[in-house]
Structures are given as structure tokens and as C-alpha cells.
Amino acid sequence: MIVADGAAFGSEIEKLLNLMKLEPRFHLYLPESFEWMILKSGLLEDRDLKKILDEPYDYIESAENFSWERFFTKLLVALSADSYLKYSKNHLNPVYIKENIADQILKVMQKIVL
């Protein structure tokens, strides 16, 4: 399985797709961003979060957000600010690599891949 940031990986996609034609055992997973995976994991509770994640195009204003990744980063920072899950793009909170938290984030990928 190959996991990459979809936005950052775009320029290499053709090479990888050609490789995948030759080697069908490879699988590609390009999540919107790590921040999106955390938000999608269910770790944070917010009454509007599911709707935002299901219909992001209704919430992301391109004049305010250079990319969807930046929107999801701002959202994650805001929703986690006063919790043990406080998120920063500059320094990964060690809680995110604890087994139970990491497993919950990885389940997002499993739901999509399987």
C-alpha cells in the first residue's frame, strides 16, 4: 500500500499508475490530508463536523482557504484547541502516536480501502 498526500503527490501520479498496471498488488491511498483523517476518525466531537466532512464544498471558501488541506488544518486546530488532542502543524502532539489514537485514525483508511 502506498499512502501519500494527494495534493503533494499529483505530479508523480502518472508514474505510479503505470507501475500499478504492471504490479496489481500495489494499492494507492491519497487522503485529502492527515488533518482530514484525524477529523474523520471520530476522535473529536462537534455537532457540525460530520456534515462538514460529508459536504466540504459547502463550507470551504476558496477566497479564504488556499487549499482544502489548509481548511481542514484550521478546523482541526480550532476544534482541538482546548483538549488533550490539541493539534499543531509545526509539532505533532505525542498523543497522536499512542496506539489507541493512531488505531482510530488508521481505521479511517481501512474503511475507504476495503
Image: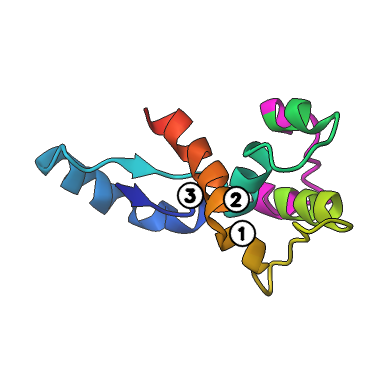
- CB contact under 8 Å: marks 1 and 2: yes
Q: In the displayed image of the protein, which residue is found farthest to the bottom?
A: 91
Quarter in which the C terminus is drawn: top left
Q: Nearer the viewer, residue 79 or 17?
A: 79
Residue 114 seen by the camera: yes
Q: Label 2: which residue?
A: 101
- Cα–Cα gap, marks 2 and 3: 23 Å
Q: Label 1: which residue?
A: 96
- Residue numbers of the magenta segment: 54-71
What residue type is disc 1 on? Answer: Tyr
| Residue at the image position 49 percent from the left and 58 percent from the top | 8
Q: Position of residue 89 (x, y in %)?
A: 69, 67
Residue 11, relative to residue 42: is it above or below? Answer: below
- Cα–Cα gap, marks 1 and 3: 21 Å
Relative placement, left or right, of 100 versus 49 is: left
What residue type is disc 3 on? Answer: Gly
Q: Label 3: which residue?
A: 6
| Residue at the image position 63 percent from the left and 68 percent from the top | 94
Q: Position of residue 14 (x, y in %)?
A: 29, 48
Q: Categorize mark 1 by other alpha carbons within 10 Å: few (<14), some (14-19), many (20+).
A: some
Q: Position of residue 34 (x, y in %)?
A: 58, 53
What residue type is disc 2 on? Answer: Ile
Element class at badge 1: helix
For marks 2 and 3 on the same chain, the one whose residue lies earlier in the sequence? 3
For marks 1 and 2 on the same chain, the one whose residue lies earlier in the sequence? 1
Q: Categorize mark 2 by other alpha carbons within 10 Å: few (<14), some (14-19), many (20+).
A: some
| Residue at the image position 64 percent from the left and 37 percent from the top | 40
Could you tell me how many numbered marks the image carries?
Answer: 3
Q: Position of residue 15 (x, y in %)?
A: 24, 53
Q: Which mark is drawn over residue 31?
A: none
Residue 14, relative to residue 77: is it above or below? Answer: above
